Amino acid sequence: MNLASTNQGLVDVVIPAYNAARYIEETLISVATQGKALAKVIVVNDGSSDSTAEIVSRFAASHPTIAIQIISQENAGLSAARNAGIKAATAPYIAFLDADDLWLQGKLNMQLAVFNQSKDEKLGLVYCAYGVISGTSARLPTVALIHPKLRGNVARKLLLGNFISGSGSAVLIKKSAFDLVGLFDEYLRAGEDWDMWLRISQSFYMDYCPEELVLIRIHDTNMQKDTFRMLSADLMILNKFEVLQQSNFFLLWKIRTILFNQHMTADAIPGFDQCAPSLQKKLSGLRLKIAFIAIAPLAIIAKAYISLKSLKLSS
């Protein structure tokens, strides 16, 4: 049986794009290789001030066999752009692709095969392995990757971190999953993927393709600024658990450990003043001091281990 012929028009692709003129054409070319699995490509122009919209329009005109819809909106962020695409989607499956990432040929068909071969109606998300590329599309083989390992009921394991390899650009999701769990949280400015996977995992199973089917582009960034942004996102996600009166001890102690290592107080994290009072107490005052007492010897041991390992590598 020709796998591609059985998967015709099953996937709407959502591409959020903000000032993506440099990469968007290369990204769209990679989508075009997916063939008949495509139902519609939805590009959400999130308030770009460059030529993103014009490039997409030219690409659409030169590829009349591919249904391409452009949605233009004022800049509202990644989650809002994805949500606009989800609302416009009508196919039974939705795949996301960041405007600078690339798909390898056959990506959608291989993920649809996992859905087709599954006997479990609860399967709601299939992800895959990924590689990384530079701003010039050169391979970066030395970057540490998250390899796909989680399948089935992964809800408890996902509490420990976002282990969905390739994250947003790697997933294929049943549209019915969004009908049940809702849209991306537009308040989160980082960690929105992890938040969504956590919510989906409460009601659906997950699976993966072991093959590398996505190329994630790595840019030069201000790592200190990025780390601070991620810390704020972790705090906002932890607050969700707190409001729901659910526990995520791993995330709580992760934040406490970062505060200890950075000699910070939690009130320096953006959004801390909006957290539940019960969470604020866990991250301040006597309870934080007690946590620091527990963390201190572990931090010393960790530093000693890293130093010893570095000496062995250099000798």
Image (spheres, grey):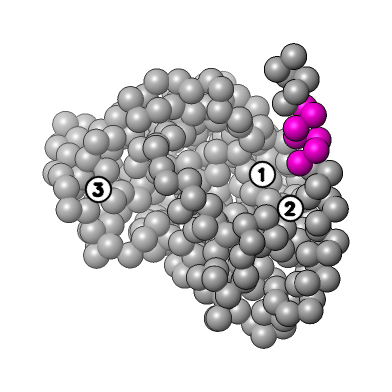
Query: Image check: 187 left or right of 301?
Result: left
Q: Is residue 147 above or below residue 10?
A: above
The type of residue carrying mark 3 is Asn
Q: Quadrant of residue 104?
A: top left
Q: Position of residue 271 (x, y in %)?
A: 52, 74
Look at the image and tell me in which quarter the C terminus lies: top right
Total tally of numbered discs in the picture: 3
Q: Which segment did they paint magenta?
A: 303-309
Query: Are discs 1 and 2 less than 8 Å apart at CB?
Result: yes
Q: Which residue is mark 2?
A: 160
Q: Residue at x 57, y 59 (%)?
A: 231
Look at the image and tell me in which quarter the N terminus lies: top right
Compare residues 217 and 210 and report the one nearer the observer: 217
Q: Residue at x 24, y 36 (%)?
A: 22
Whichever of callouts 3 and 2 sits on the residue coming sooner in the sequence is 3
Residue 105 drawn in magenta: no
Q: Which mark is residue 163?
A: 1
Q: Which mark is residue 19?
A: 3
Q: Position of residue 92 (x, y in %)?
A: 49, 50
Per the model, the C-alpha gap separating discs 3 and 1 is 28 Å
